[in-house]
Image: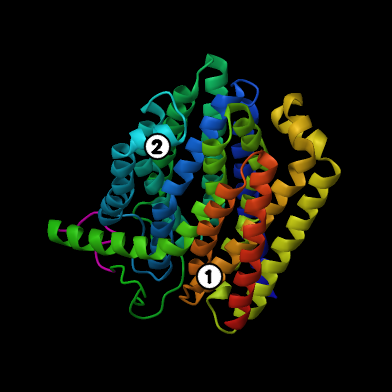
Amino acid sequence: MSVRRRDLLPGLALFTGTVLGALLGYAFFAVLGRSLPKGDLGAVGALVNLATILTVPGIGLQLVTARRVAAGRTGGVGVPDVVAAVVVGGIPAVLLAVFSPLVVQLLHLSGPGPVLVIAASAVPMTLVFTGMGAVQGSERFALLSLVQFGTGAVKFAAALVSAFLGLGVLGVVSWWAVGWVVLTVAVLWPAMGRRSTTRASGAPRADHQGAPAASGGTLLATRSEVRRDSWTIARAGVVGSVPMAGLFVLSGLDLLLARHYLPGDPSGVYTVGSLFAKVAFWGPQFLATFFYPRMARPDQRRSAVVAALGSTALVGAVGIGLAAVAGGPLVRLVGGPAFVEPLGSLAWVFTALGVGLALVQVCVYADLARSGRAVGAAVWVAVLAVVVVVALAHATPAAIVAGVASCVGGLVVVAVAIVRATT
């Protein structure tokens, strides 16, 4: 019981930062919904979701860095970590830049500028997640909470500046990218060279994905050590990110497909509706993060998985009920009166989609905690199913969200069955 009392305050801090960050991310679109034409709003929504997909390798590095710091293998972010982040974030950035003409056509943009800005933001985002891993591994949850808050704050600030200056799509994503650069500096400074506060007995434990112990946490390393350790860290991060990659692609794919298949105004309607899904998905995220260490301990795994799934489902049920009862007023608050008629009755469907994704995330974490890959494979199958279903039925926002929600609902059943069989 004493351990759980000590966990209460860090858990509340993590909850607060996560929720406030998610709300500010939602407010980003709420502000832009009142300052941009619906077509431009749809473009911004698609671009931001594309950027979210680019964060997946960074999350893999976050998990690797957190393990190394928690095990006492490093005191914080060092030169190899920075080099690995630049490489891991830089490769998809270059690929996106090369294929920007194709992306411009798929998203119906007026030029490549916004896509190139999103590509340039990949490295700062990856560096931020690497710093978050060091903070998480040293159990500085108050600071981690501030970083979670900061990820939403930089988006909200970009929306305010863009709305005040009357900027279009390129201006919005440019200020959004500037915010990530600022956040990179703010996160890396306290993450570098900090001694881990977690306990470690004897020699440092081996990282099961092979991340190095020697020079990862110090700025004093030979060039050969930096090259070797950077490559090892980068490889471990990429391998660890594959299951999460499927989840992030799944969570952002519907908005990209809606932008591709729907005309300008309906795509803007879908963008506003997707905010309900985003809040329902990201809001309970702290629960999976908080229970993850216990999921990795055989003696606590079952209770942790049950607690994480149960609490996520409970929070989600409240959200779905609220959206069903007060869909119209909530849509008016989020996007303005112009969106109430086409979206009010669909708010609960978008919310249910987000809740389904949140439950899948818990299952992905539970599977990763035992080095499993089955849930991750199921997620990628669901990604393909969403593409097929939306390709067959995409005439309206309602048709798209119903198809995607049905695919995610089936995935929840499969994922829970997999986790139950291994718990």
In which quadrant will I find the C terminus? bottom right
Number of numbered discs: 2
User: In the picture provided, is 23 more to the left or to the right than 66?
Assistant: right
Residue 300 visible in rendering: no
Q: Quadrant of the N terminus?
A: bottom right
Q: Which residues are magenta?
A: 213-222
Lower sequence index among marks 2 and 1: 2
**Label 1 residue SS:** helix
Q: Quadrant of residue 63?
A: bottom left
Q: Which residue is mark 1?
A: 375
The secondary structure making up most of the magenta span is: loop
Image location (x, y in percent) of residue 157: 54, 29
Q: Identify which residue, 330 or 213, lies in the foreground.
A: 330
Q: Is residue 140 above or below residue 206?
A: above
| Colouring | rainbow
- Estimate how packed mark 2 is, as few (under 14), some (14 to 19) or many (20 or more) residues with alpha carbons within 10 Å: some
The residue tagged 2 is 103
Q: Residue at x 74, y 36 (%)?
A: 343
Residue 70 left/right relative to 375: left
Q: Residues within 10 Å of mark 1 (few under 14, many from 20)?
A: many
- Give the percent coordinates (x, y) of residue 312: 70, 61
Q: Position of residue 321 (x, y in %)?
A: 82, 51
Given the image, on which type of amino acid does mark 1 rest?
Val
Vertical arrangement, residue 75 with respect to residue 413, above or below: above
Residue at 62% across, 27% down: 265
In the picture, residue 292 is in which quadrant? bottom right
From what the image shows, is residue 70 above or below residue 164?
below
12 within the magenta span = no
